[in-house]
């Protein structure tokens, strides 16, 4: 399930100050982080989305190569 996350906020979270602490897990990879600041949370999300985007580009490139090899073999 691409782009799905489980987020658990800890008791140290101060929502009025926009300071979030807790745990997050990316569902499709199982990658997780215990974060102690909002910036750590955002950095984790940015890293996950960047990795997913790179993976999508590689999949598209491989698909194009496969299609090209099929048409060349005709």
Image (cartoon, rainbow, N blue to C red):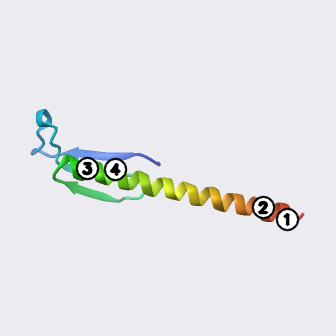
Task: Tell me: 42 left or right of 65.
Answer: left
Estimate the spatial distance between the alpha carbons at disc 4 and disc 2, rounded to whole Å. 35 Å
| Residue at disc 4, secondary structure | helix
Estimate the spatial distance between the alpha carbons at disc 3 and disc 1, rounded to whole Å. 47 Å
Estimate the spatial distance between the alpha carbons at disc 3 and disc 2, rounded to whole Å. 41 Å
Residue 63 lies, in percent from the top left, at 68, 58
Mark sitting earlier along the chain (3/2) = 3
Residue density around tag 4, few if under 14, some if 14–19, many if 20 or more, within 10 Å = some
Which residue does the numbered mark 3 point to in the structure image?
41
Task: Tell me: 74 left or right of 9.
Answer: right
**Is there a contact, CB below 8 Å, between mark 3 and mark 1?**
no
Residue 40 lies, in percent from the top left, at 23, 53
Identified at 13% across, 42% down, the residue is 13
Estimate the spatial distance between the alpha carbons at disc 2 and disc 1, rounded to whole Å. 6 Å
Residue 28 lies, in percent from the top left, at 43, 54
Identified at 15% across, 46% down, the residue is 10
Q: Which mark is residue 72?
A: 1
| Residue at disc 3, secondary structure | helix
| Residue closest to the far right | 74
Which residue does the numbered mark 4 point to in the structure image?
45
From the image, which quarter does the C terminus lie in?
Answer: bottom right
Which residue does the numbered mark 2 point to in the structure image?
68
Residue 41 lies, in percent from the top left, at 25, 50
Does any portion of residue 50 appear in the rendered image? Answer: yes
Identified at 22% across, 49% down, the residue is 39
Task: Tell me: 7 left or right of 2.
Answer: left
Residue density around tag 3, few if under 14, some if 14–19, many if 20 or more, within 10 Å = some
Does any portion of residue 23 appear in the rendered image? Answer: no
**Is there a contact, CB below 8 Å, between mark 3 and mark 4?**
yes
**Is there a contact, CB below 8 Å, between mark 4 and mark 2?**
no
**Is there a contact, CB below 8 Å, between mark 2 and mark 1?**
yes
């Amino acid at each position: 399930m691409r782009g799905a996350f489980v987020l658990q906020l800890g008791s140290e979270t101060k929502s009025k100050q926009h300071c979030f602490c807790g745990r997050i897990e990316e569902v499709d990879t199982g990658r997780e982080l215990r974060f102690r600041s909002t910036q750590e949370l955002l950095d984790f999300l940015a890293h996950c989305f960047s990795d997913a985007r790179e993976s999508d580009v590689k999949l598209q490139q491989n698909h194009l190569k496969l299609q090209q090899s099929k048409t060349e073999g005709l």
